[in-house]
Image (spheres, rainbow, N blue to C red):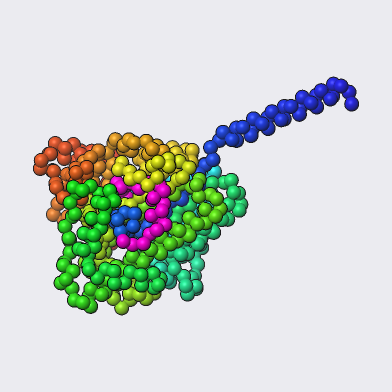
Amino acid sequence: MKRTNILLLIAAFIIVSCSSNQQAASSKQQPIKPNIILILSDDMGYSDLGCFGGEVETPNLDALAANGLRFTQFYNGARCCPTRASLMTGCYPHQTGIGHMTNMPTDFTHHDLGIPEYRGFLNKNSVTIAEVLKEAGYSTLMTGKWHLGISDKSKWPLQRGFDKFYGLTAGASNFFKPIYPRGIISMNDTISVTDEDFYTTDAFTDNAINFVNESQQENKDKPFFLYLAYTAPHWPLHAPQEVVEKYKGKYMEGWSELRQTRYTRMKEMGLIDENWDLSPDAWRDWNSLSDEKKKEMDTRRAIYSAMIDQMDQNIGKLVSYLKEKQIFDNTLIIFLNDNGACAEGGELGGGPAEQLETKEGYMLSYGGAWANASNTPYREYKHWVHEGGIGTPFIVHWPNVIPKENQGKLISQYGFLPDIMATFVDAANATYPTEYQGNKIVPTSGKSMVPVFKGENKAIHTEPIFWEHEGNKAVRHGKYKLVSKWNKQQETGWELYDMETDRSEMHDLATQLPEKVNEMAEMYDKWATANHVLPWKQIQSLYRQKR
């Protein structure tokens, strides 16, 4: 071989080697994107989990909290589908087309008023977390409750960014025997459940693990986003009997005693301030019930607690899988609930007592008196935007990012649902689009919480944040919260509270600080006008005309 050719070959080898080394170095400099898991419970109260002051056995969530962060002032959207709309998109629910509720499986236009903000399904001017993260190279997986559009497959999860889906498109089902039109969807197909041991909470977890496992087998270096949306502990009251037995008899002292016990424990844990009052008992005295009724109410509460217990056991199963696959430390896990505890079904619960501890029933609930205890120490429930309606337990676990010295820390900075989109975009080094598939996209209202996860101690929000659901409305700005509970006689009756000294909303400052009321009411009016939020009386009138 000629000397010139040898020199050329040597030069080529050097160039290739240098290029390979540069690529390797570049690859090492690129941060590994975290896996992301978002877990949502359904209709659970603020103080039900052990790590938030409850007596329910939740060792797996407690462990995530002990090794992660607990946000004591995180807010949801007061109701199932408005929360999910805001959670999935990073926008206010009205901006997504779900200004009130989604349409029903028995009536595909039930909540469709023909107004862009009130269509009853997720619009195309918003993007889902799945759509954004898929563009950033993620596998996107979902199991559980969708509740963002049901009438046709274009509104289902696979058509809104998810690669895989197993769960419900409706808002609730029988836990043991889900059947059409509130049955199980696998990918894009309705399936029949024939397993006699079927239980939705278990099935959602098993399929979530299977989806993650399949994703890892296909490409272990590809990060995944898993949205695991449990229906527990939403009614109907259904749980495995062996778990129910753990709790039967534990609630025979009644709801007032339970509230007081939790209130004391929450103060000891630092979850609430020593000076915040316990809101008043909202329902009848426990001792006014007959012995037979007490046993029934104990059973209702026991089943509810068992549903949370079983959910926690399943979260433990998922965590064990992540550890086994050695992907736990690089996985960001967030847990929260969709609204405050549910008082639907009346004071003492809905549905016949004969269906308790069976696999029968649908609207089978534990009632307002127990929901009052679940929301200790706060006022109101699901539907309303006082703290009992919108305050949620919020747990963050991310070993690779949360400093060891902060593990187990309580975070008092307040945040709300749109922050989750912003946080995931930040964590994944993704881009939130201004346009997607030819549609102009509404800007997100959220702020990334990643700096807080890393230990930064500053407010997440300096701008006001807002709520409206069924005429119940609120503004949070700094330490003040302006809130109104709708009634037929009065569209708006503003109350003002100092959240630093009175988060249980017991001391209304509206008459003492009228200028602050006017200032924040003007903020609300500007927001409502900009987002075409209609007065609830007008919405009710439109429904009457439609039906």
Expressed as whole percent of the image width and height from the top left, the position of residue 85 reads 37, 50
- On the rendered structure, is 461 left or right of 492? right
Q: Is residue 200 visible?
A: yes
The residue shown at (61%, 53%) is 217
- On the rendered structure, is 401 left or right of 276? right
Expressed as whole percent of the image width and height from the top left, the position of residue 495 reads 16, 46
**Which residue is at the far left?**
511
Expressed as whole percent of the image width and height from the top left, the position of residue 501 reads 19, 44
Let me know if residue 39 is in the magenta part: no
The residue shown at (54%, 46%) is 223
- On the rendered structure, is 531 left or right of 159? left
Q: Quadrant of residue 452?
A: top left
Expressed as whole percent of the image width and height from the top left, the position of residue 457 reads 34, 36
The residue shown at (80%, 24%) is 8
The residue shown at (35%, 59%) is 42
Let me know if residue 70 is in the magenta part: yes
Highlighted range, magenta: 55-77
**Which residue is at the far top?**
4
Q: Quadrant of residue 47?
A: bottom left
**Which residue is at the far right?**
1
Quarter of the image where the C terminus is located? bottom left
Q: Is residue 108 positioned above or below 402 on the image?
A: below
